[in-house]
Amino acid sequence: MFSTIFCWYRTSCGWLVDRLTLVGLPLNGFIMKFYFCGARQQASSSLMVYMKNLTAADFLLCLSLPLRISHYRLYCTFGASAIFLNMYASIIFMGYIAVNRYLKIVNPSGTRVLQTVRTAHIISAVTWVFLLATAISYSNLYLMTQESLTSNSSRCDPLFSESVKLFFKIIQVLSAIIFLLVFISLVFFYYSTSRRVLQAQQRQLASSEKLLKSRRNMLLLVSIFCVCFVPYHLVRLPFTFLSGNCTVGPVLYYLKEVSTMVSVFNICLDPVVYFYLCKAFRARVRKLSRRANIQQVSEGSESSKEQFGIVTSTATSQTNEL
C-alpha cells in the first residue's frame, strides 16, 4: 500500500515542483529585478531592506526546489539544507516585516534604533550568517559521517549517523522555537493593531483609515504565514521524534512531505505581500498593467482596421465586377 502511495506522491510532487518553479521563478525574478535594479530610493527604508531579503530568500528557494525531486543522496546532502535555509529565511524576514510595521504604528516618526536602515542591514546579515552556518554545519557533518546504504531508499534517515540524528533533532527543536516566536508575534501584532483600529474608530480619529490599512497588511502576513507554515510545523516535530515508530512513522512521513510542498507555496503568495506593502512596487505593477492593456487595445484596433480594409476591398472588387 505504502509503495503505491509513494509512487503517486513522487509523480504528484514532481508535477507540483515543476509548476511552482515555472510560476515562482519568473515572478520572483521580476521582483528581484525591481528591488535590486529598479528603485534606488528604496534603500532609505528599513522595510525595503527586509523586503529585499525576503525576495532573495524566495528566489533562492525557487532555485532549490528541483533538488526536492532529484536523487535522494543529492537531496539529503545539499537539497534539504538549501530548502531549510531559504524556508526559515522567509519565516524570519516575514517576522521582521511584521515587527517593522507594528513599530511604524506605535511610533510613526520612525526614529527608533530598530527602524533605521543600518540596523536592518545588520539584523539581515546576522540572520543569513546564522542560517548559513547551520546549513553548512549539517551538510559537512552529513558528508563526513554518512552511513553506507545496502538497499534503495527514498529517505534520508537510513543515511544518518548517530551524530547527524542528534544534530538534526537539535535543529528541528530550534526551528520550532523560531516558528513559534514569529507566529506568536504575528498574532499579537494583529490583535494589538485591531484594538488600536477599534479605539480610533470609537474616538472618530482621522488616523483610523491608516490603521485599517495597517490591520489589513498585518492580516495578510498572518494569513500567508498560517496557510504555508503552520501545517508543516504541526507535523515536522512529531515526525522528527516518531519517525522510527512502525505504526505512525509512515503516516507522519507522507504528511510531512505534503506539508513541505504546501510550505514552499509561499514563493507564489509572498508577491501579494510586496504588492500591498510597497507603494513603488504597486505603482510599477499598475503601470505595466496599463501598458499591456493599451498595447492590447492598439493591437485589437489594428486588427479591426485590417479586417475592415479586407472587407472594403472585397466589396469594391465585387462592385467593379457588377
Image (spheres, helix red, strand yellow):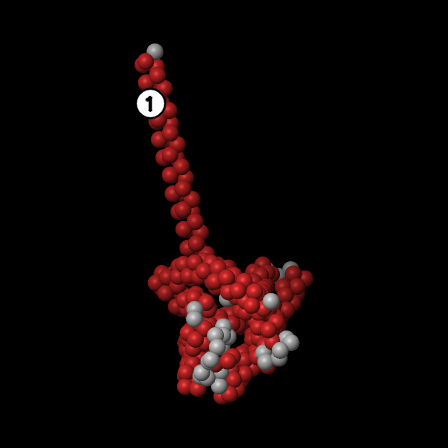
> Dividing the picture into quarters, in which one does residue 314 lie?
top left
- Looking at the rendered image, the quarter that the N terminus falls into is bottom right
In-front residue for pair 159/26: 159
Q: Secondary structure at mark 1?
A: helix
Q: Position of residue 296 (x, y in %)?
A: 40, 42
Relative to 114, say whether 42 is above or below: above
Q: Is residue 172 left or right of residue 283?
A: right
Pinpoint residue 282: horizontal percent, then vertical percent: 46, 56
The residue most toward the bottom is: 163
Quadrant hosting residue 180: bottom right
Q: Residues within 10 Å of mark 1 (few under 14, many from 20)?
A: few
- Residue 98 appears left or right of 203: left
Q: Residue at x 41, y 39 (%)?
A: 297
Q: Amino acid at mark 1?
A: Ser
Work out whether 252 lies above or below 161.
above
- On screen, 301 above or below 89? above
Q: Is residue 26 visible?
A: yes
> To which residue does mark 1 refer?
313
Is 86 on the left-hand or right-hand side of 228? Answer: left
Q: Position of residue 109 (x, y in %)?
A: 50, 70
Q: Quadrant of residue 56?
A: bottom left
The residue lying furthest to the top in this view is 322
Q: Nearer the viewer, residue 294 or 226?
A: 226
- What is the quadrant of the C terminus in the image? top left
